[in-house]
Image (cartoon, rainbow, N blue to C red):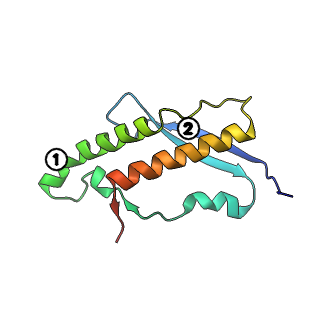
Amino acid sequence: MIKQEKISLNWSIDSEEATGSDYEVIVWETLGGTPSSRDSSREVTGWDISGWNGTGKGEEEQKAAPEKKVAAQQCFLRAGNGIAVLDDTSSAEQVEEAAVALREAIVGTLNNHARAKR
């Protein structure tokens, strides 16, 4: 038997993060569940996206940063184009499928457009 936890999601738009497009950054927060399920979003990743903002970089890297960021955003949008739109009537299976597709889109984008952390 699989133990199911009730987890709520809280989200907001980060209007201060420039995306260079018509899209906005969505910030997600997990509410409820066990501490281990809430902490999983803090997992350290193997990607370094610091090249996307150019801060503290040389002149050439600063010039290239906006293009790198836009290319990564476009890659993610293409990869995530088929992800189902969810609402209050979505089933747990639909949410799980969308979460898997979203993770695949994020990982694919980072693999193609971010440097591996050293």
**Callout 2, which amino acid?**
Ser
How many residues crowd around disc 2 within 10 Å: few (fewer than 14), some, or many (20 or more)? few
> Which of the numbered marks, if any, corresponds to residue 12?
2
Say whether disc 2 or disc 1 marks the residue closer to the N-terminus. 2
Q: Give x and y (percent) for residue 32.
A: 74, 52
Q: Position of residue 12 (x, y in %)?
A: 56, 38
**Residue at 75% in and 55% down:** 33
When asked about the image quadrant of residue 87, the answer is top right
User: Mark 2: which secondary structure?
Assistant: strand
Q: Of the numbered discs in the image, which one, if any, rests on residue 63?
A: 1
Quadrant housing the N terminus: bottom right
**In the image, is residue 86 above or below residue 66?**
above
Which quadrant of the structure image shows residue 116? bottom left
Give left or right: position of 28 versus 77.
right
Circle 1 residues within 10 Å: few <14, some 14–19, many ≥20: few
Residue 45's disc number: none
* Percent position of residue 111, x then y: 38, 55
Q: Amino acid at mark 1?
A: Lys
Q: Nearer the viewer, residue 102 or 60?
A: 102
- Total of numbered circles in the picture? 2
Residue at position x 66%, y 57% in the image: 38
How far apart in space, not on screen, are marks 2 and 1 (Cα)? 30 Å
